[in-house]
Image (cartoon, rainbow, N blue to C red):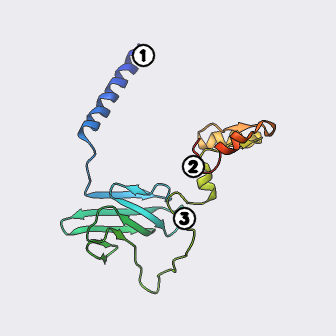
């Protein structure tokens, strides 16, 4: 009896998914987007390139109109519009054919842009990036393994130090996704 109910639920779910796929994705005129990191930085036609303070709530409320795009932000230092349009960001106009917008602050509050490495999409910091790619833990303490499973809701890939080989090392290099 339980199997029949679960089969029916599966069929209903498939029907809903297929209907949505046939409909296609609409291009919304209004976006409300929240993130805490540049790892998750895109929503439809808007991309967050830099936050003022990482790991704090960052918000974008953007509306497309016939006159352009009006954007209100919180904790956003830099953003990109993927569709060229006149825009107003936090009350400040951006040149009309611009596809890129940078949040501008009054001169007394403007911070110096640091050259070199900055936290951005795909380069948030060593800990964030390390845990986003595949990794291997050698001889983990039992408590670490238990806590990892508890908080990350994932299996920890482990190996004894004496069994680590060159292939393990090559596969676990940053960006390998293996």
Tell me: residue 112, above or below residue 136: below
Residue matched to label 3: 119
Residue at 32% in and 26% down: 12
Nearer the observer, 162 or 48: 162
Residue matched to label 2: 132
Q: Position of residue 92 (x, y in %)?
A: 32, 77
Q: Residues within 10 Å of mark 2 (few under 14, many from 20)?
A: few
- Answer with left or right where residue 119 lies relative to residue 41: right
Tell me: residue 127, above or below residue 135: below
Q: CA distance from mark 3 to mark 2?
A: 15 Å
Q: Secondary structure at mark 2?
A: helix
**Closer mark to the observer between disc 1 and disc 2:** 2
Label of residue 3 in the image? 1
- Answer with left or right where residue 145 lies relative to residue 77: right
Q: Position of residue 71 (x, y in %)?
A: 32, 67
Which residue appears farthest toward the right when viewing the image? 162
Q: Residues within 10 Å of mark 1 (few under 14, many from 20)?
A: few
Q: Quadrant of residue 61?
A: bottom left
């Amino acid at each position: 009896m339980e199997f029949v109910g679960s089969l029916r639920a599966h069929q209903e779910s498939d029907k809903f998914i297929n209907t949505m796929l046939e409909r296609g994705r609409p291009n919304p005129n209004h976006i409300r987007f929240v993130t805490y990191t540049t790892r998750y930085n895109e929503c439809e036609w808007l991309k967050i390139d830099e936050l003022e303070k990482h790991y704090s709530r960052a918000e974008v409320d953007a509306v497309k109109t016939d006159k352009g795009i009006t954007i209100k932000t919180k904790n956003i230092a830099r953003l990109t519009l993927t569709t060229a349009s006149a825009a107003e960001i936090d009350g400040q106009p951006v040149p009309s054919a611009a596809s890129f917008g940078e949040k501008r602050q009054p001169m007394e509050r403007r911070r110096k842009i640091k050259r070199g490495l900055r936290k951005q999409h795909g380069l948030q910091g060593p800990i964030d990036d390390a845990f986003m790619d595949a990794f291997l833990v050698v001889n983990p303490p039992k408590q670490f393994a238990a806590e990892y499973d508890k908080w990350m809701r994932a299996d920890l890939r482990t190996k004894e130090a004496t069994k680590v080989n060159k292939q393990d090392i090559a596969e676990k290099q940053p960006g390998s996704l293996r």
